[in-house]
């Protein structure tokens, strides 16, 4: 197998959210009949149930009406939009953002993550990521020929101790071993755990002590439940700003995924590299779409509160359902729209379970192994759904779980 | 310098079209006063002068109205749109396209090119590209750690012989030396030369003989002047279809660049890899934007003819201007919107000339060295502009040329 064949053999996406339709049909060990019910796809949020920020389509049309000036922006995004966003993101994260050289608009938060990792990881560079964490992190390290250092997060123990549960000793050992980049999501994807202030401070001190770069994916940082404290790493003023990138976007809480909008901000050195990479990857975040950034952080009065409340209610309902069944453990989501149940005693693999669930109950979830090879008894669901449909789908899910135990 | 610093030191974009604003201010050897005139940016087309295909914004709105189903398509694009496009592209290029596994929608043609090159080039792989050709080709080979084999195109000699002028002996030697990929644009960017049927046949035979992969960038293949013959390589049925990708998009002739739409089609093996890569690069071509593909190849009666005619008229006007000055040689554009004048006797470097021209005459062009290191007396202009403004800008350009000779 050639190097490139090998690379792509490792890089799978059939189990990625939304890609289930491309899986080859396999014979599954089916028990019992199908359970009728409205299909629910928990692999991503339902933007029909939780609609895009009001005025988004109108802003797109305004961008289109501007014409060529908005179609052909600088690769890092239109200057006026960068100024507006730099101001808002500085206020949100509690540290300055340079509109001129400290921010880049990207095609979605995935685009920001790709450019950021590509800007930092050279062949053979040692990169620490968290397990569990967003499935693309591992794939990106492998694609850029980095060497993977998984840092474990005992999120169930962490819950009891009021923190995410990252193994900070393991992180320091990784830095000692030569790790030059630490990338993590906060709130954590898939568990919804939020890093405590102490964890953020210690991550910062360690990174700074060893001169490492830090990329923080704060995609879900506007959707925090129970008025919990959220600590922006960049506001702590510990990591050298030239070694720090923060990533965020309006695809989740704001339901703007269909526009593909994301932002990375922080280190001018790294953002310069990201723009060079963007120039050969896809030139720019789609020009007219960029204009939709204008109402971000300027939603109608009360809109964000309502959205967070609605999600907190769905979370509470689904958590209660999961907790009603022995042998299922869940950490309550503190931020974001994910639940990551641990199901003991399944007699089928998690991969087969996910397929069976879709076949027999019209419910789509993402297998835990996408978030770390050890999560063979977990699945993830995005509960940004219609509340009633989600409730019924989890009732069906629990019935299927009982069948296969 | 670390490997990654070295990689990004080589990967520049300050001279890329539209990025001029980010260049550091330098002292230029200015002669004479500024020449007043409406600014013209020939680094890309003017979509205000040549507007997007009628109905594009309406289609975007329709896509938005569909909601979640259109926001979250498969990474390779929505199934129904792929079916529609596969049919149209098969008819246009004269060979079958599989909607299921032979096509991927991408964020612009640049996105298609990045994914295609990333799907084929492994570290150390030998890759042949043309000089002159689109500036990103070289950068992509370097980014993916390939080894560059430039194949020369004597386009001025080619003009006299009714062909593009590719050195086919050099191409065969490259294949003999182990080149596994040949990538080229047709019509050629920046010269506007179209490859003759004989050249396309010979490229095909050589690639097939040596088992190489071919990527053909046909971005401008709908904008052919003087009813000239255009030969789609994939219709020749010579190269193994599993080793062949064709790239196209509606950003140029159709002025849809602000939506970022592109397509790659052909080899299922390579498209599977491209989708895996898309999953970590930016997930998908923006969902609502994808819907704008619907009116592509279904423009109103006569619309495309009018657009081609309008560009042919601008070409004729600007060519006449350039030819009125001794020591400037130009091959007439056969397809696409580029002119690539060769200017003899300039006393400043082409890089300085381009900056002087912008400073003194409000005219932006792209230095020839972006298209190959040897094009030190060339610049490229995209003449998809308002005819009058473009005419006046070239008159100013010629005056500046005379000043610096």
Image (spheres, coloured by chain):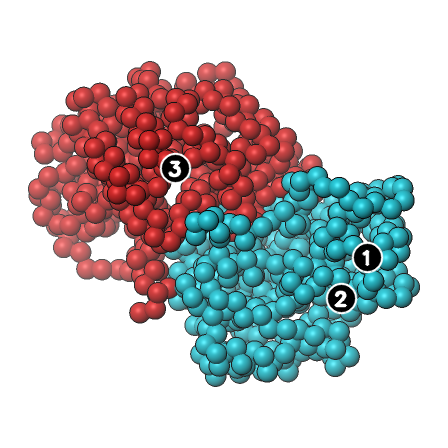
Chain colours: A cyan, B red
Provide residue A263's location: percent of width, then percent of height.
53, 58
For marks 1 and 2, the one nearer the N-term is 2
- Indicate whether A256 appears above or below B393: below
Q: Quadrant of residue A167?
A: bottom right
> Quarter holding the C terminus of chain B?
top left
- Cα distance, mark 2 to mark 3? 48 Å
Give the labeled residue for mark 2: A333
Q: Residue at x 34, y 28 (%)?
A: B204
The extreme front residue here reads: A1
- Indicate whether A65 appears above or below A198: above
In the drawing, does residue B202 fall left or right of residue A159?
left
Secondary structure beneath label 1: loop
Give the labeled residue for mark 3: B213
Q: Chain of mark 2?
A: A
Q: Are marks 2 and 3 on the same chain?
A: no
In the drawing, does residue B167 fall left or right of residue B21?
left
Q: Is residue A181 visible?
A: yes
Give the labeled residue for mark 1: A347
């Amino acid at each position: 197998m050639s190097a490139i064949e090998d690379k792509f053999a490792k890089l799978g996406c059939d189990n990625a959210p939304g890609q289930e339709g491309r899986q080859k049909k396999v014979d599954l060990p089916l028990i019992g009949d199908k359970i009728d019910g409205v299909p629910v796809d928990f692999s991503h949020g339902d933007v029909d149930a939780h609609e895009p920020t009001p005025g988004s389509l109108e802003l797109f049309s305004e961008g289109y009406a501007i014409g060529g000036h908005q179609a052909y922006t600088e690769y890092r995004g239109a200057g006026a939009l960068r100024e507006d966003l730099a101001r808002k993101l500085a206020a949100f994260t509690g540290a300055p953002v340079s509109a001129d050289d400290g921010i880049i608009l990207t095609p979605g938060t995935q685009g920001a993550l790709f450019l950021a990792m590509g800007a930092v990881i050279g062949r053979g560079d040692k990169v620490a990521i968290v397990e569990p964490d967003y499935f693309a992190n591992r794939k990106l390290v492998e694609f850029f020929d980095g060497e993977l250092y998984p840092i474990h997060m005992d999120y169930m123990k962490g819950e009891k101790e009021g923190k995410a549960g990252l193994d900070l000793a393991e992180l320091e050992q990784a830095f000692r071993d030569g790790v030059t980049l630490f990338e993590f999501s906060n709130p954590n994807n898939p568990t919804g755990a939020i890093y405590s202030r102490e964890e953020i401070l210690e991550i910062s001190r360690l990174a700074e002590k060893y001169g490492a770069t830090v990329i923080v994916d704060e995609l879900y940082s506007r959707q925090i439940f129970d008025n919990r404290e959220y600590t922006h790493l960049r506001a702590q003023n510990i990591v050298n700003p030239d070694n720090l990138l923060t990533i965020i976007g309006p695809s989740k809480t704001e339901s703007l995924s269909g526009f593909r909008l994301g932002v990375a901000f922080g280190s001018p050195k790294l953002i310069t590299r990201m723009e060079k990479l963007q120039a050969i990857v896809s030139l720019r975040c789609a020009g007219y779409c960029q204009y939709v950034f204008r109402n971000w952080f300027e939603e109608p009065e009360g809109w964000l509160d309502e959205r967070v409340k609605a999600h907190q209610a769905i979370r509470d309902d689904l958590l209660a359902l999961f907790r009603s069944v022995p042998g299922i453990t869940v950490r309550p989501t503190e931020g974001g729209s994910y639940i990551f149940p641990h199901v003991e005693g399944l007699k089928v693999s998690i991969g087969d379970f996910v397929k069976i669930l879709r076949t027999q109950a019209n419910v789509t979830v993402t297998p835990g192994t996408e978030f770390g090879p050890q999560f063979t008894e977990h699945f993830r669901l995005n509960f940004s759904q219609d509340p009633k449909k989600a409730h019924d789908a989890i009732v069906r899910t629990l019935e299927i779980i009982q069948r296969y135990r």
